[in-house]
Amino acid sequence: ASPKFHLLGTSGTVTTLAGVHLELERYDRRRVDGLWMDRQSVDRMVEKLVGWDFQQRVANPCIGADRADLVLAGCAILEAIRGVWPSERLRVADRGLREGILSELMADDGVWRSDGRGR
């Protein structure tokens, strides 16, 4: 049976993969944040980025010159993680993960209400 968990990817490489997957004309965190990618889609995007030369990566509006080399290292790290924890799905997060976890913990503890106000 396949594991009943999913991976959560935040920032950097994972959000770049999501932007390329969505074929965005420019990076849009509202479209990327919360996106679910299945294993095959992640595989395709990693293969695509690794197959592109430097100029092709620079030309992609979700990558650009600043990330054109870094994204390859990020893909290698992501693949290593996926090798250790194989999962059928990856959730993309491009908003404050720590803040979200803190808010949820505070709400569970009764310190913070879900409407964003204190007790």
Image: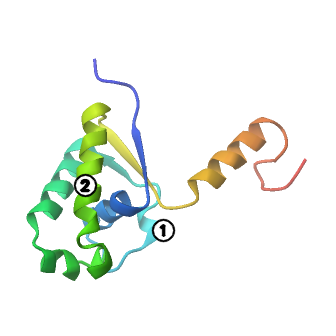
Residue at image coords 34%, 80%: 26
Q: Secondary structure at mark 1?
A: helix
**Secondary structure beneath label 2:** helix
At x 19%, y 55%, the residue is: 46
Which residue is pictured at 22% across the width and 61% down the height?
A: 72
Vertical comparison of 77 with 52: above or below: above
Q: Quadrant of the N terminus?
A: top left
Q: Earlier in the sequence, mark 2 or mark 1?
A: 1
61 or 113: nearer the viewer: 61
The mark found on residue 65 in the picture is: none
Amino acid type, callout 2:
Cys
Residue 4 location (% of width, % of height):
39, 26
The type of residue carrying mark 1 is Arg
Rendered image quadrant of residue 14: bottom left
Q: State if disc 1 and disc 2 touch (CB < 8 Å).
A: no
Looking at the picture, how far across and down is residue 60, in whole percent?
23, 77
> Residue reaching furthest right?
119
Residue 84, percent from left and from top: 29, 32
Compared across the picture, whether 118 is left or right of 94 comes to right
Instruction: Tell which residue pokes out farthest to the top in this image.
Output: 1
Quadrant hosting residue 51 = bottom left
The residue where tag 2 is placed is: 75
Mark 1 sits on what residue? 30
